[in-house]
Amino acid sequence: MGGWTLVAHVAELPRARGAWGRVLALVPPVLFGLTVLWAWETVVRALEVPRVILPAPSEIGARLVSETPTLWTDLVQTFVRGSLSGFAIGCGAAVLFALVVDRYPFLRRGLLPVGNFLAALPIIGTAPIFVMWFGFDWPSKAAVVVAMVFFPMLVNTVQGLAATDSIQRDLMHTYSAGWWQTLTRLRLPAAMPFVFNGLKICATLALIGAIVAEFFGSPTRGMGFRISTEVGRLQLDMVWAEIAVAALLGSAFYGFWALLERRVTFWHPSQRGR
């Protein structure tokens, strides 16, 4: 209760402006996380919970230190090769396809429902197929990520391109602006909040997709491979270490796009007062 009260008190403090205010904004979540870890450690030690059921945070931290080379190898295989490559290909293709859909409206009526159907396909069913098509290494994981991020990015970009008011479009028309000029000067800048919303959604989907895809076949490295292997060996502290790395990595990747969004769309009402 003391930790909870401290976090609540710190969260209610008035927020300062500038860089110092952004640093102080990190204090409540950090304190809350430390409180959760302390409670976790205390409960596990007090109740003598077996390590194969729930290891203590101290044991997980020891694994993070002792298995750093292995964790780094898994991170490179899953995130850098599988997740990042699939994220770049899927999001890039979605933005380009959204421009085509916006240029030719009949595609929106014909192909977007098909894309919605494909996006509804379960990853558990499609991942083994991609593994058979592209092999056991990272290209199959990148293909799964492309399939997961393409449609969310496409929908957000298409909605963003349609977000301008008719008055704004009529004004560009009075300036004799063509489709390309209207796109670059008005519609694409107005779509940036939607584009970044899609990028933030896909940032978390990409890592999840790459990890899940590794459960269906991978070389002897990767986060998903390590989790499935260590669960079979009842090494739950190593499993939690991989989970911790994935959570921190996913949060950092999401935070990167959120920070870039704040820099690019500083003019948008959603960014005021932050």
Image: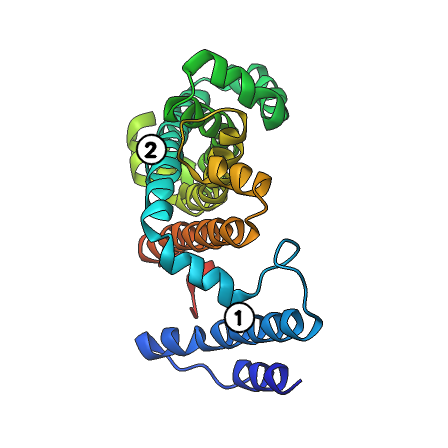
Classify residue 117 by image quadrant: top right
Q: Nearer the viewer, residue 52 or 197?
A: 52
Amino acid bearing label 1 = Gly
Q: Residue at x 36, y 29 (%)?
A: 92
Per the rendering, the mark at residue 159 is none
Q: Is 146 located above or below residue 264 in the figure?
A: above
Residue closer to the observer: 105 or 170:
105
Q: Quadrant of residue 32?
A: bottom right
What is the distance, in whole Å, between disc 1 and disc 2 at their CAs? 30 Å
Above/below status of 271 relative to 78: below
Compared across the picture, whether 78 is left or right of 204 comes to left
Kindly identify which numbered label has been placed on residue 81.
2
Residue drawn at (47%, 73%), measured in percent from left and top? 30
Report helix, strand or loop for mark 1.
Answer: helix
Can the viewer see residue 162 in this picture? no
State the residue position of label 1.
33
| Whether residue 50 can be seen here | yes
- Horizontal and vertical percent for residue 43? 66, 72
